[in-house]
Amino acid sequence: MGQIGSANPAPVPGGQGEANDGPSWWCKLIAKGAGVAAGLSALIIGIMNCFTFTPICLAAAVILMMVGCMLIAMEAPCCCPFLDFIQPLGRWSDARPHLQKAIIYGVCAVVPIALCFTLTQLLSCALIMATAVFYGLMALGKKADRNEMAVRARSTGETEMKATLINNMDVEADQK
């Protein structure tokens, strides 16, 4: 914390002095909420899909329920306070980069659909995939401000383009 009269005052949240490279709090909250909703829907739809006549669809339903449990354990460990291993799993999940979570959730969303394609599984896996997309977008990071994008657009390939333009202008001048 900064002191009165010090040369380096404490950074103001969202101000110039704070390195604000990570996703905002509401973006993290949306991703976690989507993960919990996807986990609950995967559990419910997995239970509903267990009443089937084909063994492949039964396996897909069991996998869907396992994915739902994994999502709830990783996104909302507070839902299972009576299980001792859930809290360390939640902390481990929070320490993972967003790209890893996006890949894990994306793969987990494809497996049940690949085994047994039904409308209910498609709905549940779409919610899981939406969670993966949210984490993927958070892994991309924040968009640069307009001035920084303009500077990068001007500097990209500028020397090659200038050399080509100068050569073309010289050729046109020689032809006249």
Image (cartoon, grey):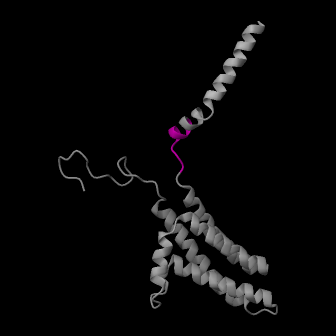
Q: Tell me: residue 164, above or below residue 139.
A: above
Residue 158 visible within the image: yes
Q: Assess whether residue 57 is covered by the magenta stretch.
A: no
Q: Position of residue 93 (x, y in %)?
A: 50, 74
Foreground residue, 14 or 108?
Answer: 108
Q: Residue at x 78, y 80 (%)?
A: 115
Residue 45 falls left or right of residue 115? left
Chain part drawn in magenta = 143-150
Q: Position of residue 63 (x, y in %)?
A: 68, 84
Q: Tell me: residue 53, above or below residue 117.
A: below
Q: To which quarter of the image does residue 56 belong?
A: bottom right
Q: Residue at x 51, y 44 (%)?
A: 145
Q: Quadrant of the C terminus?
A: top right
Residue 92 falls left or right of residue 106? left
Q: Position of residue 66 (x, y in %)?
A: 63, 85
Q: Position of residue 112 (x, y in %)?
A: 73, 79
Q: Residue at x 63, y 33 (%)?
A: 157
Residue 145 falls left or right of residue 41? left
Q: To which quarter of the image does residue 55 belong?
A: bottom right
